[in-house]
Image: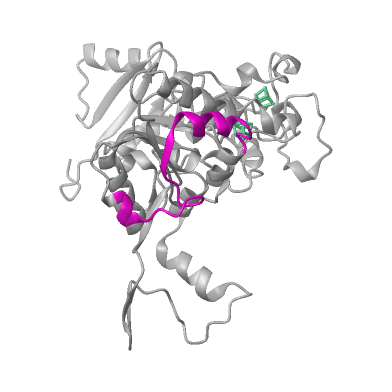
Amino acid sequence: MANNGFSPKIVGFLCRWCSYQGADLAGTSRIKYPPNLVPIKVMCSGRVDPSFVMKAFEMGADAVCVFG
Amino acid sequence: MAKPKVAFYWCASCGGCEEAIVDLAEGVLKVVEAVDIVFWPVALDIKRKDVEAMPDGSIAVTFINGAIRTSEQEEMVHMLRKKSGLVVAFGSCSHIGGIPALANLTDKASIFKKAYSTTVTTVNPEMTYPQESFKVKEGTLTLPKFYDHVYALDEVIDVDYYLPGCTVPTDLILNAVTAILEGKLPPKGTVLSPNKSLCETCPRNDSKPEKLKITKIYRPWEIMIDPEKCFLEQGLICIGPATRTGCNERCISANMPCRGCMGPTDQVTDQGAKFLSAFASLLDVTDEKEIQKIMEQVADPAGTFYRFSLSHSILKGKVK
Ligand code: SF4
Ligand code: SF4
């Protein structure tokens, strides 16, 4: 990523039924996307607790996304 | 057989935890009969040097209340750790930071400025601030270092057990003392109070409707509080869902919502975030702007959701 060398670490919580399937589809369709996103599959985006988001930041994430 | 030696110590605390021992009333006699109290600054004239002279590990159990915010407190708890077989964190401040840990939302410089200069009742034209050392003609006077952060006890020393609450309920103290005397202790690190949420044991739980729907938040003084209904149903913030039981619902019986002093259950790391999560699901709106409008009614969210647990939280406090 041409961003002054800064490459953000992004943690994404992905719903198993929609966004995670989307990410899978992107994979099987051989669409390329940057490796910065660490996807975490959850059974529903409603399962994401505020403490998960805080924990991700605590562990060094630059951004946290919840997809659902 | 010699009686087991017991010590009590206080750090950044209000004195309420000492009161809890006194509140044991005649129960205290049973304790005094069974143990030998070797150190208890509030009640006995035993000095630091006397404790220093005790052999390592000679105190069976030391109960430490209060958070850690000065160098003296840090030194004392390190010493007591060495002298004691067991260390029990006693009360919310020692357990999870408590009220003193709310200072982590600000910093030492701002606290000193407020306390020694800007409060309306303070007159300090020469800007005299506490110093760690000060020369007078008789010699040098010293004061302990005041830290920029307030710590729970287990952030400073190894802790064996926790007695939660502001202050610790008397039955929990007696149960703990009995368990120690009889050698029937649970695994190290246990919080010595049932691992259930307060809502589970709350007498108002039955009155709670299937789905709580909050559209407006009140502070206790703004409405006449119904003495039977769940506080959340009345739009009052009650931290019960994210709080451990064991306090005999004492605030609830006094018609006041729970503030969370018993800390979270074992499964929860961050009490404030857990409450926020539970609370957000109760708001009866879906529009983002409406949600924001309701949340803005929460006066001091960090101080409310983390009233007692800031030291043990992921949030921690102000970035310094
Ligand atoms: S939210 Fe408070 S009042 Fe309601 S059931 Fe839980 S502890 Fe009781
Ligand atoms: S009701 Fe809540 S704030 Fe009151 S003593 Fe119990 S846990 Fe603490």
Residue located at (65% from left, 32% from top)? B238
Residue B48 lies in magenta, yes or no? yes
Q: Is residue B245 left or right of residue B234?
A: left
Q: Is residue A64 left or right of residue A4?
A: right
The way the protein has been coloured in the rendering is one colour
The quadrant of the picture showing ligand 2 is: top right
- When the figure is inspected, residue B38 is found, relative to residue B183, above or below; the finding is below
Query: Percent x, y for residue B169?
Result: 58, 31
Q: Nearest the camera: B312 or B11?
A: B11
- Tell me the quarter of the picture where residue B239 sits: top right
- Tell me the quarter of the picture where residue A59 sits: top left
- Tell me the quarter of the picture where residue B137 sits: bottom left
- Kindly tell me whether residue B263 is visible in this rendering: no
Q: Nearest the camera: A19 or A25?
A: A19
Q: Write the start and end of the magenta stretch as one range.
A: B23-51
- When the figure is inspected, residue B64 is found, relative to residue B234, above or below; the finding is below
Residue A51 lies in magenta, yes or no? no
Residue located at (53% from left, 82% from top)? B124
Query: Percent x, y for residue B128?
Result: 45, 81
Q: Quadrant of the C terminus of chain B?
A: bottom left
Query: Percent x, y for residue B244?
Result: 53, 25
Residue located at (57% from left, 24% from top)? B246
Q: Nearest the camera: B263 or A34?
A: B263
Residue placed farthest to the front in the image? B1
- When the figure is inspected, residue A13 is found, relative to residue A20, above or below; the finding is below
Badge count: 0
- Kindly tell me whether residue B197 is visible in this rendering: yes
Query: Percent x, y for residue B94?
Result: 43, 41
- When the figure is inspected, residue B41 is found, relative to residue A48, above or below; the finding is below
Q: Quadrant of the N terminus of chain B?
A: top left
Residue located at (19% from left, 46% from top)? A6
